[in-house]
Amino acid sequence: MNEDGSVVGVDEQGRTIAIGQLALITVENPNGLEKTSGYYYNIGPNAGTIEHIKANGGAAGKIRGNYLEMANVDLANEFSQMITTQRGYQANSKIITVTDQMLEELVNMKR
């Protein structure tokens, strides 16, 4: 991706081909955006006017090709959620094992 937002590719013969161009938008009221999932937003009724801007054209910011973006994930929070989920899974599997043993014992008592 180039700084002007154009996405380029290379064909089998090594020729550079323009695939498309990334468009940026600005909204009058960023608080009017509605969060959907993760880092995705929809334009809500309170967002105000929407302006389409070419990349590196002003208030929407810049596109940096061949740059590495810093992670926007809280690793400590993600690890604690993963451990909590793992413990929940272990507890549920233990419940299934204990229930199976209880039913087996009940069947043995009936014999």
Image (spheres, helix red, strand yellow):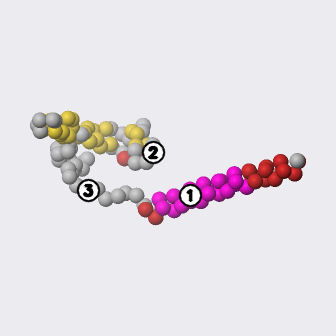
View extreme (front): residue: 111
Can you tell which of label 1 and label 2 is closer to the viewer? 1
Residue 19 belongs to magenta span: no
Q: Residues within 10 Å of mark 1 (few under 14, many from 20)?
A: few
From the image, give the main secondary structure of the stretch colored magenta. Answer: helix
Residue 55, given in percent of the width and then of the height, sits at: 20, 44
Residue drawn at the location 17% of the way across and 47% of the way down: 3
Residue 37 got which mark?
Answer: 2
- Region of the chain picked out in magenta, as a range: 78-98
Q: Is residue 36 left or right of residue 7?
A: right
The numbered dot on residue 86 is: 1
Residue 65 seen: yes
Q: Residue at x 51, y 58 (%)?
A: 82
Residue 42 coordinates in the image, percent (x, y): 40, 40
* Mark 1 or mark 3, whichever is nearer to me: 1
Label 3, on which residue? 68
